[in-house]
Amino acid sequence: MDENVYSIDCFDTAAEQIPFLSSMPGTQKKLLIDNSTRKAKRKGSFLFREGEAVDALYIILDGRVKLMRYDSEGREQIVGIFSKGETIWEGLLIDDSQFPYSAVCLEKSLICIINKCDFTKVLSDSNVALNIIAMLSRKLHDANERNLLLSTRDPKTRLAAFLIYRQKRDHADTIDLQLSDIAASLSMRPETVSRKITELIDEGLIRRSGKSSIKILNFEGLEGLTI
């Protein structure tokens, strides 16, 4: 897939499946769609890098993107993983804001890019502003859930909580993530994650499905570990 401007004829239809755009009044939605840029991105390519100015909003039309940074010892930390239909726009409404992390494509992805100036224009509509506030509230709730997850000290409990979190977020019984990405998301060592995955497999709660997929077999049992 070439990394260039991507023309998608059915984008108007796709927009109805994107929460950020679906509830927006027609005029404002058209403004954003008409002035947006669609790009095809290769696996491993960057949408933006840590320290760059926040000057655009990114909507994932297809694929998955991880937000990551490195700690003081050079270890990768994954701040979040975003998939189809989700929007990356933290800090967009803050003056002179810079990204505190980098965004990297986990697979081939299609990205819609909306410039900050076009986004701020539609905020003059009170309905749009209320929708944005609601979305920010949901993102804050999600961030709080993730912080609670990371505060769990027991590695097995933390892994179980993470798998439940991803299942609810992705609405799928299979979590498609490499071992290193799970470890970076949980601030754990890959070998520790590997051992705990084996324990959950032995208990019949999950099973491996390919090299980088985990299928939840017993959601209630997994949830019981986190209580």
Image (cartoon, rainbow, N blue to C red):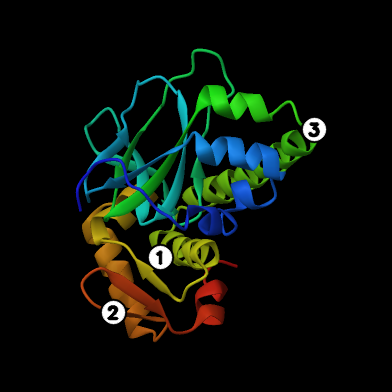
Q: Which mark is nearer the camera, 2 or 3?
A: 3
Residue at image point 49% right, 33% down? 35
Closest to the observer, 128 or 100: 128
Disc 2 marks a residue whose amino acid type is Ser
Name the residue tied to disc 3. 126
x and y percentages locating residue 51 in the rendered image: 35, 21
Name the residue tied to disc 2. 209
Q: Residue 156: which numbered mark, if any?
A: 1
Image-based side of 219 in relation to 3, left or right: right
Residue at image point 33% right, 41% down? 77
Farthest residue, direction right: 126
The C terminus: image quadrant: bottom right
Decide which of tag 2 and tag 3 comes sooner along the chain.
3
Decide which of tag 1 and tag 2 comes sooner along the chain.
1
Q: Is residue 136 above or below residue 124?
A: below
Q: Secondary structure at mark 1?
A: helix
In contact (CB < 8 Å): disc 2 and disc 3: no
Disc 1 marks a residue whose amino acid type is Lys
Mark 3 and mark 1: Cα distance apart in space: 46 Å
Disc 3 marks a residue whose amino acid type is Ser
x and y percentages locating residue 87 in the rendered image: 51, 44
Residue at image point 43% right, 20% down? 98
